[in-house]
Amino acid sequence: MGFAWIKRFLPRGLYGRAALILLVPIVTLQLVISTAILQRYFEGVARQMTQAAVQELILVLNRRAADPAQAAAIAQDLFIDVTPGATVSTTQRDWYDLTGIEVLRVLEDDLPGLVAVDLTSDWRRPQIVVDTAEGPVTLSMSRNRMSASNPHQLLVLIVFTGIFMAAVAYVFLRNQLRPIRRLARASEAFGKGQVVPFTPSGATEVRSAGHAFLAMRSRIETMLEQRTLMLSGVSHDLRTPLTRMQLGLTMLEQGAEVEALKRDVEEMEQLLSTFLDFARGEALDDQVAADPVDLARQVADDARRGGGQVTLEAPERGTDVLLRPQAVRRALTNLVSNALRYGTEARIAVALVPGAVRFSVEDDGPGIPADLREAALRPFTRLDIARNQDQGSGVGLGLAIASDIARRHGGSLALGDSTRLGGLKIDLVLPR
């Protein structure tokens, strides 16, 4: 497995990963330097200074036993206060006094008769209680003679300098990543059929990617425009002879052969309309706030007027969602038409879930096998072997159109089994 488990705890976005790459070295450097300073510098300096202070304390104590007057003069010259008696009985140290650990260790090892040390009452002048032949004595001297003055200042300086440099690097990193995020948003919007203003900026590589995206978008827009113009001409050129054929058939003597020809012409016109709807899939309407429940109700009512048995399960009133109502209605109409073509009953359900709206269309037909569902979403793919061909025919574009509309909304179209009706269930999920 290696280090694959680490990926579960890493940020997924580029911004988070870049920030992590920036902060990990800074924090690691802070920890290494702080540890090295505490162990090799402050502890060593505190040990040497405390050992020198202990020699002075021993000198005062030894001279005090032989000549108290001379000991008092020496103590005064060394700025050591000597007080008969014990002012403290237990050793005390603040938890944040890191150099105090080494001070206490040296005092316990080198100072004979040590009873207690108070490093908390007066941090500037510790109280040291020593047991002598004349009784306990309290010695007091400057803490600066035992350890470096204000050792925490160096650590604070390191921490605040690291925080400041991290903030500066964070601002610089954000400015460098902003063009990438803008490019990602423009690409995502274009994939959904939206054209948002975008100007390449940032580093040279990011600018190159931005210019390549603009060139690609321009080529695609030109291609789509040319295809739309071509389809408009094809639509006009094909509908004109079909109309003449329909007029000619109405003038002929009616009979079985004429009725069959009329059905063929009507089917050709329907196939042409379906093909043009698919080919014009990129020309979707603009996004507006619409009620998905109302759209589903309109589709169900249209299907009932056409003689279909359709039930709708949805709340009385939904929440307005930003979508393309005409495109969504076209997709639902295709799904309901397929359900009624291959079955006798259809069911539409609308559910508003967090962050998305889900349309479910079920039927009581034969369904589609799981291994053929991916192929069913491809254009011009007919699965009439799995679906009842006697109840209708098509060109295999109904599901492809609905899938394309879902994809251009940033959603998805999923095929499954209907547990209620026993046929096919299609979930059209659109983001809110």
Image: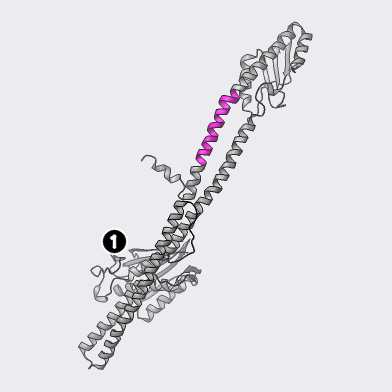
- In the depicted structure, whether residue 66 falls above or below residue 349: above
Residue 334 % position (x, y): 35, 73
Question: Which image quarter: residue 302?
Answer: bottom left
Residue under label 1, please give it. 370
Residue 359 % position (x, y): 41, 67
Q: Nearer the viewer, residue 344 or 106?
A: 106
- Tell me which segment is drawn in magenta: 23-43
Q: Residue at image x 74%, y 9%?
A: 64
* Left or right of 407, for residue 322: right
Residue 217 % position (x, y): 41, 63
How many numbered discs, if any? Answer: 1
Q: Identify the image quadrant of the N terminus.
A: top left
Give the residue at the far top of this rendering. 66
Q: Main secondary structure of the magenta part?
A: helix
Query: Colour mode?
Result: one colour
Q: Nearer the viewer, residue 211 or 261?
A: 211
The answer to whether one can see residue 67 in this image is yes
* Left or right of 288, for residue 115: right
Question: Which image quarter: residue 275?
Answer: bottom left
Give the residue at the far left of this rendering. 257
* Left or right of 358, for residue 121: right
Tell me if mark 1 has few (under 14), some (14-19) or many (20+) residues whose alpha carbon lies within 10 angstroms of its own. Answer: few
Residue 432 % position (x, y): 48, 64
Q: Is residue 35 magenta?
A: yes
